[in-house]
Image: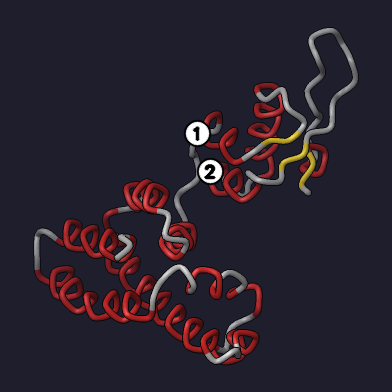
Amino acid sequence: MLRHQALGATAPRAADGDAARQVDLDGGREELVSRSGENTRMLDNDLAKLAQMVEAPQIELADVERWIVRTAEVQPWDFLNAVSARDMRRSLELFNLLPAKSYVWTYTLLCGRIRELIVAKALDARGQGRELAATLKLQSWQVKNHLTWARRFSMAELVAALEGAVDVELALKGSADSQTALLLWITNILRKS
């Protein structure tokens, strides 16, 4: 668990002068770093803000989403993870925060992620899910959620997503509607059949 003092900030004192309280940030840890960035000063400030705003000893994801404004640039990995988790709301929120110039890069990364999920799905079906990192030639931490994510899709949905990428690539290379094409493709991936 990430604790307030772990980031080197002085935990806020209660209004009556009581000692600083210990705050557990478990459910919202990744979202806090995503929104604040990796700068420890920003993390300290936002964590202190959360400690003051949230009365409960546990700070949840919803607390971070409610009280912390995104100051860090959206990382493509956060977006890929949201799509992989089939989280429509978060995927669209993060997509809207991506720089417009990054659409081709986002498309390329998403195609790669879909391929990884296809491999994960196939290995899982054969009972060989533990071999995913070695098969993809990645570190185990890079694929720690892939099996869970792959189980949220049927193989037909993943293959259809990759097939749909062909039309998106054409739109990205020669159309003024590249954002619309990419967004439509993403929502089709996220939509459950």
The one nearer the camera, 91 or 14, is 91
The kind of residue on which mark 2 rests is: Arg
Q: Residue at x 49, y 39 (%)?
A: 71
157 horizontally vs 58: left or right: left
Mark 2 sits on what residue? 35
The one nearer the camera, 188 or 109, is 188
Q: Position of residue 31 (x, y in %)?
A: 57, 46
Is the residue under label 1 in contact with that under label 2 (CB below 8 Å)? yes
Q: Position of residue 178 (x, y in %)?
A: 16, 62
* Residue at the right extreme, as displayed: 19
* Numbered disc 2: secondary structure: helix
Q: On the rendered image, what quadrant is the C terminus found in?
A: bottom left
Say which quarter of the image contains residue 156: bottom left
Q: Is residue 85 above or below residue 29?
A: below
The dot on residue 69 is 1
Q: Residue at x 39, y 72 (%)?
A: 109
Q: Residue at x 65, y 26 (%)?
A: 49
